[in-house]
Image (cartoon, rainbow, N blue to C red):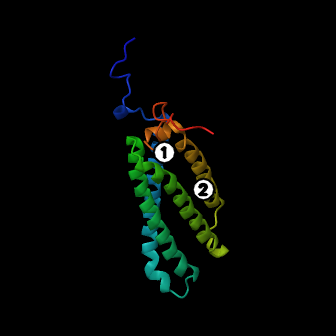
Amino acid sequence: MQPTAATTQTPLTKKRPTGLTVIAIIWGLTGLYNIATSLNTIGTDLSVLPDLSNPSLDPWFQFGVPAETALSVFLILFGLLQFVTVYGLWRGKSWSYRSALAIPILIVLINASFVVLYYSAPLSLNLRSPTLAGSVAGGVVWVVVYWGYLRRGHVKEYLNVIRHITKTDARTDEPTN
């Protein structure tokens, strides 16, 4: 059978690994979720900012609301960076590899900061939730799986972050010890 244009891969028409496609879609959806929930949180926080000077309000809110707003802004920024990185992963851009390794770790750290923030609140505010800590644990598991896949040879090759060494690339004139 003769190869056709549809079955032949050239360096310009590399086939995206299926796992990378799945990861890019999931990551795009989580980026959208991060942005949507953060915008909702910021909207709520901005609506209560005028009430922070109320002496009857628990003093924790004077720190907690601005801190929650700041964390949400960071999460929006990283959600937007997720979209840029998804584009790079989808198109096989080498710059997306490092972003794809770093951003999930930073998002897990932001989510862990939310947990610390909410757990620092007085019990009477009822902000503590086991699902918060569970989401951070789930994020860590995701990072481990995600990193493991991204570091595979065929994925790195698709993203142009490794070069295959062929016999013609190896130096044969150097003595071996």
In screen coordinates, is 68 left or right of 90?
right
Residue wearing tag 2: 135
Q: Where's residue 121, x and y in %?
A: 62, 74
> Dot 2, how many residues are within 10 Å of its Cα: few (below 14), some (14-19), or many (20+)?
some
Quadrant (top left, top right, bottom left, bottom right) of the N terminus: top left
Q: Is residue 104 above or below residue 40?
A: above
Measuring 56% from the left and 62% from the top, which residue is drawn there? 109
Residue wearing tag 1: 26
Q: Where's residue 75, x and y in %?
A: 47, 62
Q: Where's residue 71, x and y in %?
A: 49, 68
Nearer-N-terminus badge (2/1): 1
Q: Amino acid at mark 1?
A: Ile
Measuring 41% from the left and 50% from the top, which residue is drawn there? 95
Q: Amino acid at mark 2?
A: Ser
Q: Where's residue 74, x and y in %?
A: 46, 65
Q: Which mark is residue 76?
A: none
